[in-house]
Amino acid sequence: MSVEVTGESLESPEEPAAPQASSPAVAGRISWRRPIAYLILTLLLGAMWMSADGDAIFSLTRGGESIEIPDFTFGSAAVCCVLTLVGLLATVYAFVRAVQRKKIGVLPTIAIGVSAVLGLLAWYGGGSSSRITLTFALASGLASATPLIFGSLAGVVSERVGIVNIAIEGQLLAGAFVGVVVASWWQSVWLGLIAAPAAGAIVGALLAFFAIKYNVDQIIVGVVLNVLVIGLTTFFLGTEPFKTNKINLNSSIFHLDRIAIPGLSDIPVLGPVLFDQTALTYFMYALIAALTVYLYRSKWGLRLRACGEHPKAAATVGINVRATRFRNSLLAGAIAGLGGAYLTIAADIGHEFNDKMSSGKGYIALAAMILGKWNPIGAVGAALMFGFAEATAILLPTLDSSAPANLINMIPYVITILAVAGFVGKSRPPAAENKPY
């Protein structure tokens, strides 16, 4: 309201607004996935506890270490009982945090995962004369996880820039095949290590070419490329150069030697596992750190993530979205190609190539990437979990020769399904993933 005084208008002070009633906060939906997954694992541990019998012999050394640790013998039932209690504590904690609508964190997952693996080994090794060599299991797990780590990192790079990389399986297979062929032809494992990422990059280039230039659905292109690489490698394996004995193009004698880091490799338990490895494994350590810095602490990583989240906004500030996607698709393919080389020539024991060598590792790497929520560190952690599951499947038959091999070989794939179904929860992929630009 206004009052006229001597021809001037004076505005009366505004009346204070009436206080509005604060609306009650809307509680978020409770996620029961992880608590239920913990409960299932705890029930399995309890079942192993009830049926465990005999003593289990645990060994922390493989033999030949500078520091020898004596073996430990425990009752199988006692070990399973303690691990069941650990699982029960993690489960109760998860349910309480879920009811409070708070994050559960990664430590309970690690605790219950380690408990499940140790419980299975103790239950299966109870009464066996064979030792449960934990150092061997850790080393075998790291070896099994190495190609998965390379594959999951390739998926992180590719999908962060907006390209769905279903073709990781084909990139692994191409790297394994070309790596062993070049190493056998030139009799140099180092030339094979150069050729393997180049082969993976070619598969990545094909994926980028069809997805970026012609806007073909990236998932379909990836599946087709996987089938193409399997068909090509199978065809070449049946050709004359691979059948004759004059020149062996698929030799297992070319492989990298272990390089023990003085001092670090003498650390009990973890030293031989982490610091007595091949050059490619050490390169993998550096690659994990470099990619983490590249994605989150550099302008190139910012541009990469911008192309995967909002390509139109990226283009408005001068970023060439298509070129950025193409370059990083090549980088992702090269990383996966190195993982394929580990299957044949880059491990400390060489292997001849076969068309079933990848055995679905590319798809498991994709699951690790999703479980790790498109983060390099998270993807590596998930890949290690799958690698240790495979190592457990390798160790179990040594404890009991009558073990059902077909069921044991299913362990890594069952773990993959359970992990993705039970632990992923709400995870948001890059917004522009599989969207042409």
Image (cartoon, rainbow, N blue to C red):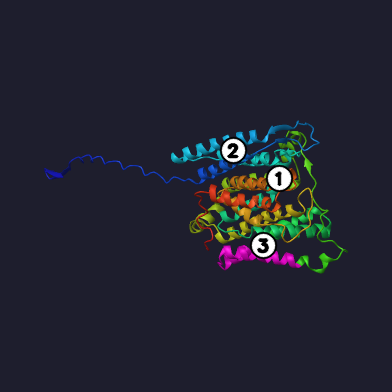
Q: Distance between the residues labelled 3 and 1?
A: 37 Å
Badge 2 is on which residue? 111
Counting residues from the start of the chain, the first of labels 3 and 1 encountered is: 3
Residue 374 visible to an observer of this rendering = no
Give the side of residue 17 with respect to residue 314, left or right.
Answer: left
Q: In which quarter of the image is residue 225?
A: bottom right
Quarter of the image where one finds residue 99: top left
The quadrant of the image that shows the N terminus is: top left
Q: What stretch is highlighted in magenta?
A: 206-235
Q: Position of residue 288 (x, y in %)?
A: 65, 46
Secondary structure found at label 3? helix
Q: Could you say where residue 158 lies in the image, as x and y percent from the top left?
A: 60, 56
Which of pointers 2 and 3 indicates the residue nearer the eye? 2
Cα distance in 3D space between marks 2 and 1: 21 Å
Identify the residue position indicated by label 1 in the image. 396
- Image: 284 above or below 161: above
**How many labels sit on residues?**
3
Give SS at disc 1. Answer: helix
State the residue position of label 3.
203
In the picture provided, is 135 more to the left or to the right than 10? right
Query: Is any atom of residue 379 visible in this view?
Result: yes
What kind of element bears circle 2?
Answer: helix
